[in-house]
Image (cartoon, rainbow, N blue to C red):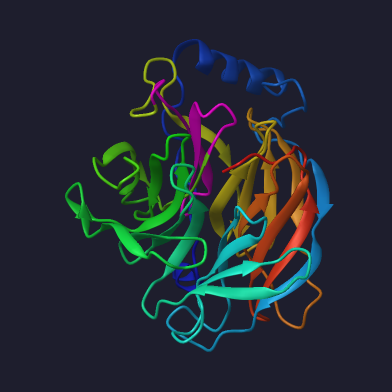
């Protein structure tokens, strides 16, 4: 996730980092030369970019938060981290909530009523996920913490805080494997000083290991359906990286499966925020500041663009994160901006999987 303060920079598109070597690289080059997508699904333009794909219009579902008072992050409302809880409700973070208001909330999709879960006057929560290991909510705080609690807000504790592997951590998004190991993006770095990281922690927050570094604002992170690789977005570089993992998911796979750049975007003053993956392997990449979500095939073909209609008095462009209900095509997108915080719905291309 990212807020108004990111607009103080001037974005750029740095040169592509080294891609997958050997045979994999040859396949990609051949695809660009011949104009065929790697998966054969759609042609590629001469400059290597995917064709436009179809447009999916997101539909207003409900308002979950008012316009927040002006603060250090601007005069707007930002939501983050939607995830389905064990009760079927949609849990999310109200990142810009005032100190006396809940920063973790839950939406009953049937009644469309919102209830508060947890208050924290100082936290700058950027994501929320449920761990498969203990069923608890895990929250990343950009101030340098990873917190956890029961779904009802009780049992609060801090799992990770302070310096990690030699420097302060700015945890943004989090993903879990089946055993509850945490994979966290460290939201640091620019294209000129790429210091962002992807760090793996054991389920109890110990034994941190850097899986990837040299990133320009590491942000979104999602497993592919096989839990064999991660899709990692770089907010300040406008790209999504592909990180294959070893069989035990404790280190990069290495060899011909070295990390590479999977997709590029042209976001202007916006940036690539959080992402999600469906059961077909499609990557849903939120474009913060642009009011849309790109849907890519795992081969980089742009299949669709999900667009939030701008029908309110002021812009609603803070498309930060989304969740697809497991086993269905029902997608839920959290949208912030100058009118408050809202949830929109859309039909996903593939069914949802447990995050």
Counting from the top left corner in percent of width and height, residue 97 is at 51, 80
Tell me: 121 left or right of 274: left
Looking at this view, is 167 or 152 the one in front?
152
Asked if residue 10 shows in the view, the reply is no
Residue 264: in magenta span: no
Residue extending furthest left? 166
Looking at this view, is 39 or 85 the one in front?
85
Quadrant housing residue 39: top right
Counting from the top left corner in percent of width and height, residue 44 is at 72, 29
Tell me: 31 left or right of 152: right
Residue at 76% from the left image edge and 83% from the top image edge: 313
Tell me: 164 left or right of 18: left
Q: On screen, 36 above or below 110?
A: above
Counting from the top left corner in percent of width and height, residue 7 is at 49, 69
Residue at 38% from the left image edge and 72% from the top image edge: 123
**In what quadrant of the picture does the C terminus appear?**
top right
Residue extending furthest top? 23
Magenta-highlighted residues: 223-248
Residue at 62% from the left image edge and 15% from the top image edge: 30
Q: On screen, 147 above or below 177?
A: below
Counting from the top left corner in percent of width and height, residue 227 is at 52, 29
Looking at this view, is 234 or 154 the one in front?
154
């Amino acid at each position: 996730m990212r807020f108004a303060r990111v607009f103080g920079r001037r974005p750029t598109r740095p040169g592509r980092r080294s891609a997958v070597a050997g045979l994999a690289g040859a396949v990609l080059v051949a695809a660009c030369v011949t104009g065929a997508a790697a998966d054969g699904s759609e042609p590629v333009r001469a400059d290597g970019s995917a064709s436009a794909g179809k447009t999916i219009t997101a539909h207003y579902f409900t308002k979950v938060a008012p316009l927040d008072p002006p603060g250090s992050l601007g005069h707007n409302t930002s939501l983050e981290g939607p995830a389905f809880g064990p009760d079927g409700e949609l849990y999310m973070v109200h990142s810009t909530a005032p100190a006396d208001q809940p920063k973790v909330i839950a939406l009953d999709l049937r009644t469309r009523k919102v209830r508060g879960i947890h208050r924290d006057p100082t936290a700058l929560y950027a994501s929320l996920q449920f761990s498969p290991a203990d069923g608890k909510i895990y929250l990343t705080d950009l101030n340098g913490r990873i917190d956890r609690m029961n779904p009802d807000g009780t049992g609060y504790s801090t799992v990770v805080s302070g310096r990690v592997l030699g420097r302060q951590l700015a945890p943004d998004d989090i993903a879990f494997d089946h055993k509850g190991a945490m994979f966290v993006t460290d939201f640091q770095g620019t294209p000129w000083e790429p210091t962002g990281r992807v760090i793996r922690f054991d389920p109890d927050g110990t034994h941190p290991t850097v899986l990837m570094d040299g990133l320009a604002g590491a942000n979104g992170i999602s497993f592919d359906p096989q839990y064999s690789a991660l899709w990692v977005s770089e907010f300040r570089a406008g790209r999504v990286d592909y990180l294959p993992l070893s069989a035990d998911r404790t280190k990069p796979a290495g060899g011909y499966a070295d990390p590479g750049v999977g997709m590029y975007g042209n976001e202007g003053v916006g940036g690539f925020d959080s992402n999600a993956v469906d059961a077909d392997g499609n990557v849903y990449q939120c474009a913060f500041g642009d009011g849309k979500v790109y849907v890519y095939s795992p081969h980089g073909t742009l299949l669709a663009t999900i667009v939030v209609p701008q029908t309110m008095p002021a812009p609603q462009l803070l498309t930060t994160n989304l969740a697809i209900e497991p086993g269905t095509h029902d997608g839920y997108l959290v949208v912030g901006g100058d009118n408050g915080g809202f949830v929109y719905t859309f039909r996903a291309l593939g069914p949802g999987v447990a995050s």
